[in-house]
Image (cartoon, rainbow, N blue to C red):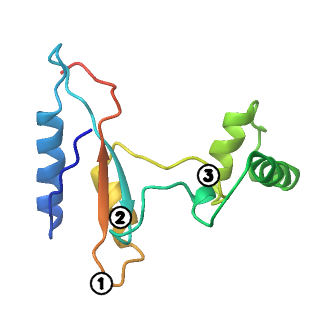
Amino acid sequence: MSLSERFAETIEQMTTIATQLRNEWIDESDLAIIPWFRGHADAEWALKPKFYRSGPTDLKTECEIREEFITHAPSLCDVPPRNEWEWYFLMQHYGAPTRLLDWTDGALIALYFAVRHNTGDRDAAVWALDHGGSIGM
């Protein structure tokens, strides 16, 4: 695993970095990797799902949260989720604590989430992930 930091102070610099990553992350078949991005309002925050941020957790707690959400969620969607993962995605969408992390292939979307609640007293961060998938270019 290789971690490297790059710094941007403008939207133009951010888009340049995102383009550089796409150009640098090319696999052995010459297919470009589209990075996934995640924005954090505080660069010091760990890359950790909401469910694990408040201390020790267990499967029982996770099941209780999911069951409580399922009980109260029918009004949130026209068609109820068909399986456990669809419930997790719906929970994540509505801010319930899950073991999922939101990622996007849009660098500027991640940047929005990094700066929307950042008051300027700390550095924000945008994480980039090579998820192992690729696209033909």
Residue 59 drawn above or below residue 43:
above
Residue at mark 2: 112
Closest to the observer, 6 or 59: 59
Residue at mark 1: 120
- Work out whether mark 2 precedes mark 3 in sequence or the reverse, and give the earlier one: 3
Tell me if 55 is positioned left or right of 31 in this view: right
Q: Secondary structure at mark 1?
A: loop
Instruction: Kindly check if marks 1 and 2 are in contact, taking CB atoms under 8 A apart as contact.
Output: no
Determine the image quadrant of residue 79.
Answer: top right
Q: CA distance from mark 1 to mark 2?
A: 14 Å
Instruction: Kindly check if marks 2 and 3 are in contact, taking CB atoms under 8 A apart as contact.
Output: no
* Residue type, mark 1 in image: Gly
Determine the image quadrant of residue 134.
Answer: top left
Q: Secondary structure at mark 2?
A: helix
Q: Residue at x 18, y 13 (%)?
A: 29
Closest to the observer, 131 or 82: 131
Q: Position of residue 38 (x, y in %)?
A: 38, 53
Tell me if 2 is positioned left or right of 85 in this view: left
10 Å crowding of disc 2: few (<14), some (14-19), many (20+): some
Please name which of the two marks, 2 or 3, marks the residue nearer to the observer.
Answer: 3
